[in-house]
Structures are given as C-alpha cells and as structure tokens.
Amino acid sequence: MDFAEQRKKLVERMVASGILKSKQIIDAFLKVKREAFFTEDMKNYSYVDSAFPIGYGQTISQPSTIAVMLELLEPKKGQKILEVGAGSGYVLALLSEIVGKEGKVIGIERIPQLANRAKHTLAKLGYKNIEIVLGDGAKGYAKEAPFDRIIVSAACSEVPQALIDQLANNGRLVAPVGTRFMQQMQVITKNSKGKLKSFFANGYFVFVPLISEE
Ligand code: SAH
C-alpha cells in the first residue's frame, strides 16, 4: 500500500471509531503527509496509529490522540493558533490546513535541532502561515498574543498561567494535564467577557513532559 492509501485508511478508521467528526479536521488529516515528519529510518511506520521517536528523546504524537485534541480545540478558518511543543511540526501542518491563508499558526519548541528540522520540513512542504519559535512554551509567546486557540503537546501538571493569560476572549485551550505517566485532556475556555471555564474530557494519555523553568 502506498502512503496516500494508508493515510486514507487511517482517517477512515478514526472516523469509523467516532474519534474524528469535524469536516475541517478530517480534511486536514487527509491532506497532510505524516511521512514527511518521520526520519528516514522510521517512514514505514508513518500510518501506524501510535507515537514514534523523532530523536532527542521526543515523539511525534499519535494520530488518534491528535484527533481527540483537535476535536476538543475546535480550530476554525482564519484563527491564530499557538502550539506549545512543536516537535516534528506535524500538528502545525494540520492546524495550518484548518486555519487557511487568512490564519496563522505559531509553534514553540525548546530543542533547537527539532525546531530547525520542523522549520525545514514545513518550508519544503510549502507551508507559509506557520512560524516556529525556539523557546520555553510555558511562557507562551507574548509577541503574537492573544491566541484564538492554544494547544499544548506535552504533559504538564497544570496549565501554565502565561498560556491562560495569552488566550483571547472566546478562545479555547487544550492541554494534557496530570502526572508524569498519565494525563487527561483539560479544556479551558474564555468567554467574550474573559470569564474562564474548564473541564476534563474522558480518556487517558501519555505525553512526553513539558520541560520548563516556570
Ligand atoms: N506535536 C508534536 C509533538 C512533539 S512531542 C508532534 O506531533 O511532533 C512534545 C514536544 O514538546 C517535544 O518536541 C519537546 O521538546 C517539546 N517541549 C517540551 N517542553 C517544552 C517547552 N517548555 N517549550 C517548548 N517545547 C517543549
């Protein structure tokens, strides 16, 4: 099976299992070549629904986990979105497809080699509305704040306050929150007046940790 066919099959399975629901998210998964974010030796695993090593002790997130997060995040066309923990850049590419040309996606990554590789991969694929920033994502990215959506792609014991502060009114944030070996998705929303609400979605996940001095 070639990659295009494997991609379609993986998406069909996620739709059939009820994880993937929204058209804009399904379309993004159908479009983005996950194999482009794998190192050469790992490419054959590109459409296995699992996390895989991308070097430096980090992993590319599992597709069905990303699907759960994106469904909770409710990203829309034209939005400005921040991802903390850009890693391979795969989630940024999915978000870029969803926000489109009028939107903007910013990814923060603390490991320089990964930030550089993600930059290179995304440029090669032709993405123009994605910016990769090297730094500590727990501090957010004040320069581009506020954000309509914030997605945290590494495990934290609680959502860093800076991220909540940098969430726009009517914004939504999704983060895996819990202990080192088990997290649940926390969704934080800000209404039009800036009032916060929060809930934990069903299901448990294991992410690599958010490493921060904060
Ligand atoms: N969405 C990525 C997931 C990468 S794993 C993908 O699909 O490829 C999580 C990433 O978060 C790792 O690359 C790790 O280096 C990064 N990370 C951990 N703590 C961070 C922090 N404080 N700031 C920015 N990036 C961080």
Image: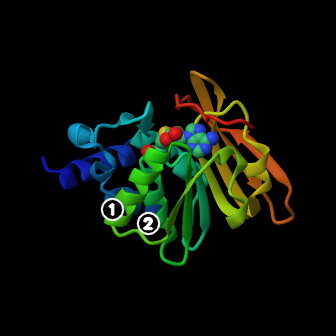
At x 64%, y 54%, the residue is 150
Residue under label 1: 31
- Does mark 1 have its CB less than 8 Å from ligand 1? no
Residue under label 2: 97
- Which label's residue is closer to the chain start, 2 or 1? 1
In front here: 76 or 55?
Answer: 55
Q: Mark 2 near mark 1, Cβ–Cβ under 8 Å?
A: yes
Q: Is residue 87 visible?
A: no
| Residue 155 x %, y % | 60, 33
Q: Residue furthest front?
A: 112
Three-letter code for the amino acid on which mark 1 is drawn = Lys
Neighbour tally class for label 2: few under 14, some 14-19, many 20 plus, Cα within 10 Å: many
Three-letter code for the amino acid on which mark 2 is drawn = Glu
Q: How is this picture coloured?
A: rainbow
In front here: 30 or 113?
Answer: 113
At x 26%, y 53%, the residue is 8
* As drawn, 181 above or below 39: above
Q: Residue furthest bottom?
A: 102
| Residue 35 x %, y % | 27, 49
Distance between the alpha carbons at the discs numbered 2 and 1: 8 Å
Would you identify the image quadrant in which residue 32 lies? Answer: bottom left
In front here: 42 or 91?
Answer: 42
Which element is circle 1 on? Answer: helix
Would you identify the image quadrant in which residue 209 lies? Answer: top right
Horizontally, residue 116 falls left or right of residue 34, namely: right
At x 32%, y 64%, the residue is 124
* As drawn, 76 above or below 30: below
Quarter holding the C terminus is top right
Which element is circle 2 on? Answer: helix
Horizontally, residue 52 falls left or right of residue 8, namely: right
| Residue 27 x %, y % | 38, 62
